[in-house]
Amino acid sequence: MNNIHPANIYLTRSNKEQYLNQHARVIWITGLSGSGKSTLAEGLEKKLAKKGYLTQVLDGDNIRTGINNNLGFTDKDRIENIRRIAEINKLFLNCGIITINAFISPTNDIRHMAREIIGNDDFIEIFVDASFDTCAKRDPKGLYKKALAGEIKNFTGLDAPFDRPDDAEITINTDELSIEEGIEKALKFILHKVMR
């Protein structure tokens, strides 16, 4: 922390970033279910916290159960889900906070919308690249088993599309890298974006 006391100033984003000694950024992690998005997000948060950065992780657990609990999985609802998440990110940016998002956000159009709402300069897209077969073997929530048995319809990567990102700043292949290696690769890229 520095000598600026928030009670003594009109608080702009820049003031808050100076107070927190960081640059606010939106880290947007995309990939198939089971690719390692949430594990990467949690690992990044811990590493950044150890270095003194203030962060907030947003994922399906804290978004779909709260602010977006009225949305389903139709195309229209998926777009609205990401739109709301992007707007939430803008609020965190204005507070000087680094947000780490872990969402499938399956199409380039959806991700471009989020980038446009947030602003290109503040948006860092990370593609967690893992094959459908690898994710199906991991299947941490049992979703692939249900989808392959026909119990879940419009499952991303099976009968609903997933576009490989066309403008991700960094790709982490979790077929090849360990989680720790992936976290370190992402951290190295992100640190120079958030340092003051």
Image (cartoon, rainbow, N blue to C red):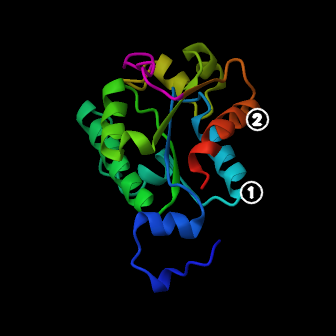
Q: Nearer the viewer, mark 1 or mark 2?
A: 1
Q: Which mark is residue 50?
A: 1
Tell me what residue is drawn at x 63 percent, y 73 percent.
Answer: 2
149 vs 186: above or below = above
Camera-nearest residue between 35 and 49: 49
57 vs 11: above or below = above
Q: Position of residue 107 (x, y in %)?
A: 36, 25
Check if residue 14 falls in the magenta segment.
no
Q: Earlier in the sequence, mark 1 or mark 2?
A: 1
11 vs 179: above or below = below
Distance from disc 1 to disc 2, alpha carbons, whole Å, reads 15 Å
Tell me what residue is drawn at x 48 percent, y 54 percent.
Answer: 62
29 vs 177: above or below = below
Q: Position of residue 192 (x, y in %)?
A: 62, 43
| Mark 2 lies on residue | 180
Left or right: residue 168 compared with residue 187: left
Magenta residues, as a range? 157-169
Tell me what residue is drawn at x 65 percent, y 25 percent.
Answer: 138
Question: What is the quadrant of residue 72 in the picture?
Answer: top left
Q: Position of residue 128 (x, y in %)?
A: 57, 27
Local SS, label 2: helix
Check if residue 163 falls in the magenta segment.
yes
